[in-house]
């Protein structure tokens, strides 16, 4: 697996990647960063254990950390894009200090800001996996093949071995949007109910 | 005392050389000695215990130092240092989604970093309790604190957060308890501003 940031182009299909990642998710809780990651996770199958962000850019990993610390016996997976992760890079350090074993941060990296006209992101130069490692997260990788993703899938759905950060280099194709729940209060309530908590 | 010194933070804390960074209890006792017997920060900790608060994210501030230290000493709570305050807004939302209660600590300057993240709290109607130590409003030596200090309450209100103030040590417990009730009982987004007059202005010597 090459970890060169300058080698940022890929052919991996983002929908296939996310479907493979979540195929055997079991009771895992999934948080999505705004934009394409939200559509990818929705396309893989909507359910109450998905919490989709449609804003709060930069907050996906931190929100996932809060969930992971509250639910240490359940796998928690954040699926986000390179632009969103760049805005919350400091969260790698915050996660590293807490060491939640059940948390995985998945960055779908096509080096583009997809929602705003596909401007190039900083990952044409910045290696997010190396950044996470330098921030103190031990299990980091850059995935470039579907085989890499299949291995990752078996790990993210367990509660041990984390925290981990996986940067998956994906292609620039933009499949048609699959639009999940935007009603955030309902998303919150159904998530809590799925965990057996009262809405109030 | 920093998070590295916590006797029971629920995490092993070693530096990169594998050295265990925990302080001994006697070191903690020495560090804590010379403090007043009951302090408003201790009152806040009691409110946290009363409400079963589990996660306490913060960017360190001098005004919150005693409370932060007490949180790290408390085995029922996890003190979580943040690299920037808006992480904490998302984190407390995540804690609630996962079934736990969190309280966010920061200085008034940090409120400025939180503005867009508060849209998460408003959109999803997330309960929130934020305790803000004030700068730039009473005997402030540092002019760089005044712009955000004087805009703190208005900024929070613009983002739909209910703002309360505690101006004296005697009222801290009641104000924080009332805000916690509205947050965790009622589901509101609450901020308690702990006045600079209460905390004491920093003395800078030239």
Image (tube, rainbow, N blue to C red):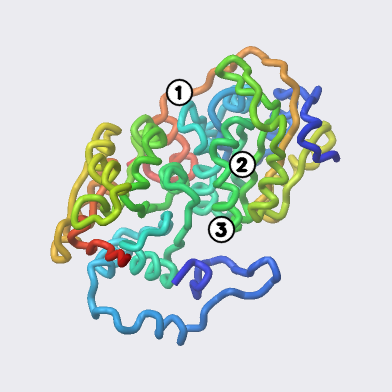
Image height of B144 relative to A97, above or below: above
Kindly identify which numbered label has been placed on residue A77: 2
- Dot 2 falls on a residue whose secondary structure is strand
- On the same chain, marks 2 and 1? The answer is yes
Image height of A191 relative to A13, above or below: below
Horizontal and vertical percent position of residue A118: 63, 17
- On the same chain, marks 1 and 3? The answer is yes
Residue B14 relative to residue A58: left or right: right
* Quadrant containing the N terminus of chain B in the rendered view: bottom left
Callout in the foreground (3, 2): 3
Horizontal and vertical percent position of residue A55: 46, 28
Q: Residue furthest top?
A: A176
Instruction: Report crowding for label 2: few under 14, some 14 to 19, many 20 or more residues within 10 A (C-alpha).
Output: many
Query: Which chain letter goes with mark 2?
Result: A
Query: Which chain letter goes with mark 1?
Result: A
Query: Which chain letter goes with mark 3?
Result: A
Q: Name the residue under label 1.
A: A182
Kindly identify which numbered label has been placed on residue B32: none
Mark found first going from the N terminus, 2 or 1: 2
Image height of B103 relative to A116, above or below: below
Image height of B73 relative to B104, above or below: below
* Quadrant containing the C terminus of chain B in the rendered view: bottom left
């Amino acid at each position: 697996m090459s970890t060169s940031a300058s080698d940022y182009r890929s052919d991996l299909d983002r929908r296939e990647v996310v479907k493979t990642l979540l195929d055997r998710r079991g009771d895992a809780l999934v948080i999505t960063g705004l934009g394409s990651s939200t559509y990818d996770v929705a396309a893989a199958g909507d359910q109450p254990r998905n919490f989709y962000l449609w804003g709060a850019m930069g907050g996906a990993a931190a929100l996932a950390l809060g969930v992971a610390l509250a639910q240490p016996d359940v796998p928690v997976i954040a699926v986000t894009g390179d632009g969103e992760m760049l805005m919350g890079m400091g969260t790698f350090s915050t996660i590293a200090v807490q060491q939640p074993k059940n948390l995985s941060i998945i960055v779908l990296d096509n080096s583009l800001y997809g929602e705003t006209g596909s401007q190039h992101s900083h990952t044409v130069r910045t290696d997010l996996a190396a950044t996470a490692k330098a921030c103190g997260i031990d299990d980091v990788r850059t995935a470039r093949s579907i085989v890499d993703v299949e291995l990752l899938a078996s790990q993210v759905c367990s509660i041990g071995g984390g925290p981990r950060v996986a940067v998956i280099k994906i292609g620039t194709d933009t499949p048609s949007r699959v639009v999940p729940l935007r009603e955030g209060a309902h998303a919150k309530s159904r998530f809590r109910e799925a965990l057996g908590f009262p809405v109030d | 005392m920093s998070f590295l010194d916590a006797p029971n933070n629920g995490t092993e804390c070693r530096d990169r050389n594998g050295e265990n960074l925990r302080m001994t209890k006697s070191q903690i006792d020495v560090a804590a000695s010379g403090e007043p017997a009951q302090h408003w920060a201790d009152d806040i900790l009691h409110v946290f215990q009363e409400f079963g608060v589990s996660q306490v994210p913060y960017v360190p501030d001098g005004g919150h130092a005693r409370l932060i230290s007490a949180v790290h000493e408390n085995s029922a709570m996890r003190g979580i240092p943040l690299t920037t305050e808006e992480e904490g807004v998302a984190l407390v939302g995540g804690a609630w989604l996962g079934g736990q209660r969190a309280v966010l600590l920061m200085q008034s300057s940090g409120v400025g970093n939180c503005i867009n993240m508060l849209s998460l709290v408003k959109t999803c109607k997330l309960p929130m309790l934020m305790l803000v130590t004030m700068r730039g409003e009473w005997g402030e030596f540092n002019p760089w604190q005044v712009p955000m200090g004087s805009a703190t309450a208005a900024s929070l209100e613009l983002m739909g957060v209910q703002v309360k103030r505690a101006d004296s040590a005697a009222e801290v417990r009641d104000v924080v308890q009332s805000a916690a009730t509205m947050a965790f009982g009622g589901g509101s987004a609450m901020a308690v501003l702990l006045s600079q007059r209460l905390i004491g202005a920093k003395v800078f010597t030239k």
